[in-house]
Image: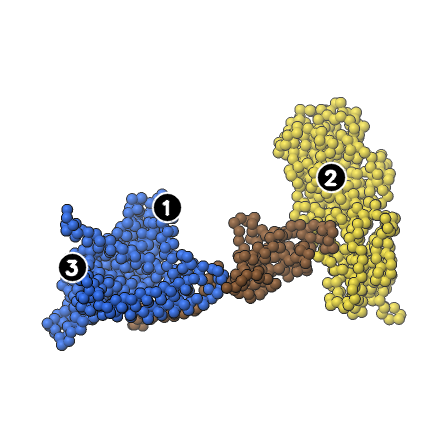
Chain colours: A brown, B blue, C yellow
Amino acid sequence: MALPAPRKKLSTPESVYLVEVIKGMFLTMSHVIKNILDQDRFRTIEYPDMRKPMAARYRGAHRLTTRPDGKVKCVACMCCPTICPAKCITIIAGEAADDPAEKFPIEFDIDMLRCIFCGFCVEACPKDAIRMDTKIYEINAYTRQDMVHNKSYMINLMDGLKPEAEDVYRAHPEQAPAGYTFDEKPVA
Amino acid sequence: MSFETVLPYLIVLGKCVFAVAFVMQIVPLLIWGERKGAAYIQDRPGPNRADIMGIRAGGLVHTLNDVVKLVMKEDIVPQHVEKFYWALAPVIAMTVALVTFIVVPFGDTFMGVPLKVSDIDGGLLFVLAMTSLGVYGIMLAGWASNNKFSLLGGLRASAQMVSYELAMGLSAVVIFLGSGSLSLSVIAEQQALPLELGFISIPAFNWNVFSVPGAIAFILFWVAAFAETNRTPFDLPEGEAELVGGYHTEYSSLRFALFFMAEYANMIVASAVTATLFFGGYNVPFLNGETIRANADTLVALIGFGAVPVLLFFSALAWKRRNRPFYRAIAVDDIRHREPKFWTATWLGLAVVHAGVGVLGLSGIIGANGPTGIGPDTVAFVLQLTALALKVLLGCWIMIWVRWTLPRFRYDQLMNLGWRVMLPVALVNVFVAAVWIIVKESLFA
Amino acid sequence: MAKVKINDTEIEVPNGTNMIEAAKLAGEEIPHYCYHPHLSIAGNCRMCLVETTTPRGPVLEIACNMQARDGLAIRTDTAQVLHMRKSVMEFLLVNHPLDCPICDQSGECRLQDYYMEHGQYDSRGLDPKVGKNKRQDIGDLIVLDAERCVQCSRCERFGDEVTGTGELRLMNRGDHTEIGMFPGDRLSHNYQGNLADICPVGALTNKDFRFQRRVWYLKETASVCTGCATGCNIQVCHQEGEVFRYLPRRNDQVNKSWMCDMGRLSYQEIAGLKRILKASVDGKAVEPDVATGEIATRIRAAGAAGVGFVLGTRATNEANWALLQMVRANVPGARIFVVEGNDGGQAAQGDTLLLSGDRNPNTAGARLLARHDGNVGDRLALLAALPELKLLVVLEDDVLGRLGAALPPVVFFGAFKNATAQAAAIVVPTAHPVEQDGSYINRQDRVQRVRRAVNPVGESAPAYVVVDRLGARLGKAPGTQMVAAAFNGMARAVERMRGLEFKGLGAEGRLLAPEAVTAVPGAEAST
């Protein structure tokens, strides 16, 4: 049985409702007028066009970093799949024949449906090979298979992003990932 | 068949089209007003994504989108419904809402033609009858849907409408006690008469709302109108929290659109009737038909020049908005950058047009001095129609405003209010009105 | 016996016990690199320094070169000892490349373990590290990375003392000391894998296991190698149903700490192409139950006189016991044989270290049962009986290859597609030793357990279960569904196994009671 909630005894003007109703309506109307005169009062971020500037520590989609020679930094040490609490990282290691690094990931898959974005993989990586500094939070696909980000996807993630994010990063340079370079484009 | 024999029918047909168009044109505006009003009350920008060539018109384009969407959507006919009555229900709802408007006068005369679709003697009764019929649409929808939520919604609607009709009818009694007529055009005309206080005659303030019983009647009538139109705080029939969609749960596509539009049409009609009964209908304060016709040129000049500063202010507001963060965020070549410029130009252009209208008024070719006698009647028609439209829109805005301010009643509170507060008050008010009329007549007659 | 004191614990150990081992008995871990229980003492890593009291006062000595004597007292927890460990670790790591992310040893690396315990943590290194030869291909199974080496010389001693081949040598001096091979030399013996095992760091790693799996993922199950009659004790390292490697498991009576490369690589056959995955009758794949029913029908049709059974020298004791019991209960009068020899019929070469020429893990067990039953024929008896047999039921062994003669229709229970399986009319898959519990008897008459590490592949089941099901079809099941029941039943019945219990076989196995009469003919000579 639910207990009856204690209710405030209404005073006479309150019990007629009308006074209180009118008081409330004046309050809402004051908002309307203020908002018409000054639309900058809105805190709304008009999403596809405007973006919330993500904090520097925000953990977005993973990317794999590369060495100056273009090869992936990862040496398939398996630290990230070991630490991963969601067990979403799958790495198949291979031997690099003529590379002093000896070892490299033949396959490096992250199942983004499983990932919980804890960032442990980044912390665990001894080679700074995986980062979550992309600030990409639109991680979506039409199939489950496409939600598994593979090695080449994660290496080229920032390249693939450029056309979409370019304008946002131009408008809000503080949102751009570290080291992001703008393409030459005349500013009107 | 000569033109003279056909003309009355053509005139009636034209007035019918005009009345329907009047209601149906305001509906999308109200939908927009509802969305934008809700948004502004809640400190958010509201709908603003849809655009035509980059012009978003503050979300008005969404209404157009809605029309396209609702027309193009699949018309789902559930297997379990009573097909005939189910299909009939939205038609009834919409028809009744539109038909009610025929007795509302939207002006005095134009070239000798009375500006109302039908001058029924029992116009007020017709209004009450039609609103009573409106409940059939909702009841049928609720019952024919064969769905417990819809049925409950229909039940609530019928109970609520029956309950509030009493208070509504009794508050209207006050009006025809005073006017001695049930015809809405007579009631409107009487309110245009100057207020005779024995020693002074004021060409305004003779509206029915400006009397003690009239004011009480207005409040009762207005509250009952909320209940009749199923608007918050009396929108229990479609209480989405407990009844999914209420009586229109099973409707989709254009059938849902009919219900949706019927609600707004009802709002318009309720506002129009309220305006006619209590706020002088098409009457412009201080300006009755004769005054307008006599001073047509002056009025045109005043209105033309008077609108210019307002439009300039709008223009400045639009120009200021180009600096909003939104325009800084989107790409430099985004098509929507033209919007502030467009609106600035549009308002400026309208200001120029109004200045032109003002010049037209100064030139004196509109009034009695003009080439034809049509000028003064046109001015009177436009002004009176504008007055009615403004009163209707204000009423509708209050309904929207109330909806986004007040919480919904509980069902027992609703019934309590209807039967135990409004009905006795309305009854007493009838006596008050009778006494008021006797006192007034004995004082000023 | 000598009473020694380690820290505050007094314990009694045999005279001359190495103090690292004594400390281990006392529950005290003394870190070490170069000491190995089965190699000579080198004393060059200096990691095992402990404090002992002499007439001159407390001094540091290496524990590995200290032998237990009465009254000896050492301490492993003094500030001096800890400081020395830290300093030794710092020296060892001066030129270490720290490529743990790549190194296969990480996870089982002594450098990592001791660094976490005794490390310096903050590097004081200013000079560049001395580079050495990395990734040297020095043998079929071994990769050498000289940079990672801590110069413990275990591999050198292994080559000198165990295999006697002596390929690996420490060269140069000071911090340029480097482990390496003579030019043009290459590891070629059958015990290379042990080098990777004894290397305490990642200098010598196994090519076969290279980059396959991180060791911390692997689960270990104690088992026995079934590659030959020696029965080396092993750890089966597996993850999620897949076996990745065998490691030798220390058993001083059988294999010390070693195992041969042949046995080490035999894990590959578990999921290999030669496994039988499905039961078949006359070449058609059927459900195992259907095949079992068909076997029963054919055994009945052949009659007791027309059917012969062959116990497996590759099968577990439990499977052999199940078959023996099943035959005696359901087909009394049927003849039973044991056919010794190697699969394919070729004689194999053993060596003097571990590998036996008899490549069957359970020859001794089959012989034991044959002796117990008293009415089991050998190879010659089977040859003689062949014309009378209409059906031959074979357990695991390649009888066709061993006999070299045409066989009557064969029913084959086994894990591998050998010649007999390919010729068999009915085949029922059985589990691999790592997929089942069971016991084998090695050439020393030592009963040793295998333990289930992974699930049986395909439709296979342990042979004793399969035989039990066949018995149920024929009328009387031998009751060997559970391995412990099968073994304990056998131990109660067989005289030399009296007193043994399946649960009591332990990690190192148990020897059979000595034989009452003369040795079994044809016993191993090459041990």
Q: Which residue is mark 1?
A: B76
Q: Tell me, yes or no, whether the two marked residues, 1 and 3, touch with CB atoms within 8 Å.
A: no
Q: Amino acid at mark 3?
A: Gly
Secondary structure, mark 2, is loop
Secondary structure, mark 1, is loop
The dot on residue B112 is 3
Toward the bottom, the furthest residue is: B199
Structural distance between the alpha carbons of marks 1 and 2: 70 Å
In front: mark 3 or mark 2?
Answer: 3
Quadrant in the picture for residue A127? bottom right
Q: Residues within 10 Å of mark 3 (few under 14, many from 20)?
A: few
What residue lies at 24% left-to-right and 53% top-to-bottom? B17
Q: Residues within 10 Å of mark 2 (few under 14, many from 20)?
A: many
Of residue B46 and residue A181, the one placed in the foreground of this image is: A181
What residue lies at 56% left-to-right and 63% top-to-bottom? A176
Q: Amino acid at mark 1?
A: Ile
In front: mark 1 or mark 3?
Answer: 3
Secondary structure, mark 3, is loop
Residue B88 in percent (x, y) is at 28, 47
Q: Amino acid at mark 2?
A: Thr
